[in-house]
Image (cartoon, rainbow, N blue to C red):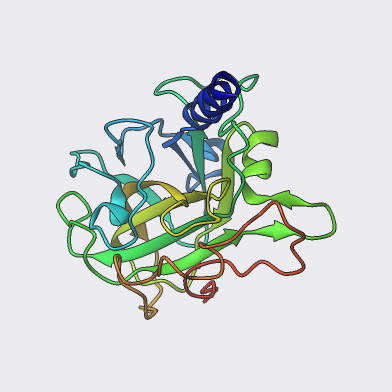
Amino acid sequence: MKSFVTAVGLLVCATSVVGHSIFQDLWVDGWMLILRRKDQVSTCARMPLSNSPVTSVSSNDIRCNAGTKPVTGVCSVPAGGEITVEMHAQPGDRNCKNEAIGGNHFGPVMIYMSKVSSSASDPGSGKWFKIAEEGYDTATKKWGTDSLNSNCGKKSVKVPASLAPGDYLVRAEAIALHSAGSAGGAQFYMTCFQINLTGSGTANPPGVSFPGAYSANDPGILINIYQTITKYIIPGPAVWTG
């Protein structure tokens, strides 16, 4: 019996490690058709130090990931254009044959933005508003992470055209809920991208703070996903569409 329990434990650990991943690349619409969908790779990404998750919602690591620091690169994004964040398990691995986030790491995917004075130096301590989310579809029984896996790790969103121009941080996040049946079991995978938004909008939407936006007991964070789910409540604020 002991050897069986040990084997099961090793299998769970191995599955957990396999599922660790990083948002690492950014695609941006250009200002002309010929420049659309420009691959910025990770030039403006505050790359996490590893593909391990953050597990505490009360730590400052929940902002942009553990140990991350500002980088020199800033990506130009037109308001009203589209950005695409891209996740993969290992740094530099963009092979679509490999799952973006595997190991049964099911959960929601979200994208936030925060207006800052300088995206190349701000620590992410300001207010964040959500511009995209994908949770759980009760009809198809698919999660936001399933969409990442079926789309080579990519999640696209149109940046609201009404946003005021200037520097922003873009925070891409996936929450893995395979072990979220007990407090502290949810795994948070996030990366912050540094951008400069161009345009003529004036909107400065209200936002939430990280830490503070999530509680360890939120119904979308403390949940047994292996039971029947009739409704999944995505953590954080509602999407701001402008």
Q: Residue at x 83, y 52 (%)?
A: 140
Q: Residue furthest front?
A: 1
Could you say which is closer to the camera, residue 188 or residue 34?
188
- Side of 100 relative to 43 (left or right): right
The total number of labels drawn is 0
Q: Residue furthest right?
A: 139
Q: Residue at x 52, y 77 (%)?
A: 242
Seen in the picture, residue 146 relative to 167 is either above or below; the reply is above
- Side of 54 relative to 147 (left or right): left
Q: Quadrant of residue 51?
A: top left
Q: Residue at x 17, y 57 (%)?
A: 122
Q: Residue furthest left?
A: 121
Seen in the picture, residue 238 relative to 224 is either above or below; the reply is below
The image position of residue 61, as x and y in percent, is 26, 52
The image position of residue 138, as x and y in percent, is 79, 60
The image position of residue 158, as x and y in percent, is 56, 58
Q: Residue at x 56, y 34 (%)?
A: 101
Could you say which is closer to the camera, residue 178 or residue 82?
178
Q: Quadrant of the N terminus?
A: top right
Q: Quadrant of residue 200?
A: bottom left
The image position of residue 89, as x and y in percent, is 48, 27
